Image (spheres, rainbow, N blue to C red):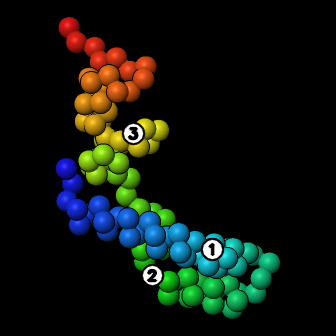
Amino acid sequence: MAKKSAVNRNERVKRIVKQYAGKREALKAIANNDSLPLEERFEARLKLAELPRSSSKTRIRNRCLITGRPRAYYRKLKMSRISLRDLGSHGLIPGLVKSSW
């Protein structure tokens, strides 16, 4: 089980990313538009830099929904390999059969 503080921090980052997504997207569009003057694009870059760091989408860490484990994460199932194996052995995941020999 992951630390509660790490899981809560990640949830807070998700909330901040959602909050600033529109503003961030608009500033990025202005900054990357080559048809605009250089000064205007530079202003957009400065405003983008003033936004909180946690508003960047790359700050979000994929974590297991069950345990909060950050590593060995399967995106399709949104869980870690350990949770997948546990639920698979108990027969709680349809179509998954844990082999043993």
Q: Earlier in the sequence, mark 3 or mark 2?
A: 2
Quarter-wise, where is residue 81 in the image?
A: top left
Kindly identify the amino acid type of the residue bearing the numbered disc 2.
Pro
Describe residue 50's horizontal placement relative to residue 27 as left or right: left
What kind of element bears circle 2?
loop
Residue found at x 29% / y 18%:
98
Query: What residue is disc 2 on?
Result: 52
Q: Label 1: few (<14), some or many (≥20) within 10 Å? A: few
Q: Label 2: few (<14), some or many (≥20) within 10 Å? A: few
The numbered mark at residue 74 is 3
Query: What residue is disc 1 on?
Result: 22
Residue found at x 38% / y 21%:
96
Question: Vertically, is 20 above or below 39?
Answer: above
What kind of element bears circle 3?
strand
The numbered mark at residue 91 is none
Gap between marks 3 and 2 measured at Cα:
29 Å
Q: Nearer the viewer, residue 59 or 7?
A: 7
Q: Position of residue 39 (x, y in %)?
A: 69, 91
Residue found at x 35% / y 48%:
65
Q: Nearer the viewer, residue 76 or 4?
A: 4
Q: Position of residue 68 (x, y in %)?
A: 28, 52
Kindly identify the amino acid type of the residue bearing the numbered disc 1.
Gly
Residue found at x 46% / y 70%:
15
Q: Earlier in the sequence, mark 1 or mark 3?
A: 1
Gap between marks 2 and 1 measured at Cα:
14 Å
Gap between marks 1 and 3 measured at Cα:
28 Å
